[in-house]
Image (cartoon, rainbow, N blue to C red):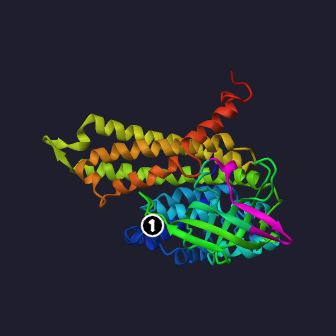
Amino acid sequence: MLFTADHDDIRRSLQKFIANEINPHVDDWEKADIFPAHELFKKMGSLGFLGLNKPVEFGGSGLDYSYALMMAEELGAITCGGVPMAIGVQTDMATPALARFGSDEVRREFLAPSIAGDFVACIGVSEPGAGSDVASIKTQARSDGDDYVIDGGKMWITNGTQADWICLLANTGDGPVHRNKSLICVPMKSKGVTIARKLDKMGMRSSDTAQIFFDNVRVPKRNRIGEEGKGFTYQMIQFQEERLWGAAACLKAHEYIIEQTIEYTRNRKAFGQSILDNQVVHFKLAEMQTEVELLRALIYRAAEQLVAGEDVTRLATMAKLKAGRLGRELTDACLQYWGGMGFTNETPVSRAYRDSRLTSIGGGADEVMLMVLCKMMGTLPGSKGSS
């Protein structure tokens, strides 16, 4: 069994925190196009929520991945997508490689304060010309004695305007594209780091997303995570936790929209009966609830394998793909049943419609997920086993 009484204790604490400290403020944060990351993360860090599966010696709880997955699922109860995404960047996107491969020195400097909520973290992989195609990034970190000197830029960086440090993927050599990259912890206050602009997004409004430039930024080589040239490999490992997190965070969010749609359509009358009484509506909602439960089973299976130390690339990729596709189908169907009210920004379904669209793009687009799966199946042109 994936979850135990210990999981349930933490789950109840997190549910109470979300109800008292997050959801009452979501509407204001959405209007402001930003939430107070330092203030919120400090509260979460003080309660131990930011390091459930991180090493005890750096302030974490030392628990297995199932606890992080449980937290991701509960964050779906936050009534917007931007805040849970920002938390997920802190816990499951910018810090897993650091926790696993970083030296004690670099973990003390960057991981410990991130777990405590004293630092806000962001992850710097995507660039204007290299989103899902990670191997083609252009940002360079050239060697200069005991330092790296970084030039380039990153795009679509969640937490970017508030972050204290960025887990940066950069080219540190001239070799093959899969073996010439390194992950480097770069303080955002370093000379030459410029937040070019805060992006105006369709959804995820409460999450700040930035374009960042690096101009002759000097950082010590001791800030590198693990071995030089292993950054691409580390990031691919890190992606598995990110993709599972993204899928798990959709579950309760999807269920919430189904529940809200049932309530609205039950009370809304048209042609002498409630909207919900139409077979096409209640059948579709039952089908969507079934799809959510199937996705949950897939995610739990992947999590069990990850806890057991197995490679979950295939299942995590499937979960990420399915979560994005389901989010698009489910929110579109539910919005339709809300009618004209669904097209207004004052309803939860319209926010979900906008926010959920990112799941099929961020962390690897649907098409990349399909390429990964086809390669594993031997059906991708040029891969072993393809015709």
Q: Does the magenta run of residues contain 97? A: no
Q: For residue 365, what is the image quadrant?
A: top right
Judge from the rendering whether residue 321 lies leftward or rightward of residue 228; answer left or right. Answer: left
Q: Residue at x 54, y 72 (%)?
A: 161
Residue numbers of the magenta segment: 133-149
Asked which secondary structure carries label 1, the reply is loop
Nearer to me, 86 or 309: 86
Q: Position of residue 185 (x, y in %)?
A: 72, 68
Judge from the rendering whether residue 209 lies leftward or rightward of residue 202; answer left or right. Answer: right
Q: Position of residue 70 (x, y in %)?
A: 58, 57
Q: For residue 286, what is the image quadrant?
A: top left
Q: Does the magenta run of residues contain 134? A: yes
Q: Does 288 sit above or below residue 196? A: above
Q: For residue 319, what is the image quadrant?
A: top right
Q: Does 302 sit above or below residue 147? A: above
User: Disc 1 designates what residue?
Assistant: 206
Nearer to me, 93 or 262: 93
Q: How would you rate the neighbour count of disc 1 (Cα within 10 Å): few for under 14, some for 14-19, many for 20 or more? A: many
Q: Amino acid at mark 1?
A: Ser
Q: Residue at x 64, y 61 (%)?
A: 124
Residue 206 in view: yes
Q: Does 54 sit above or below residue 131? A: below
Q: Residue at x 64, y 78 (%)?
A: 189
Residue 95 in view: no
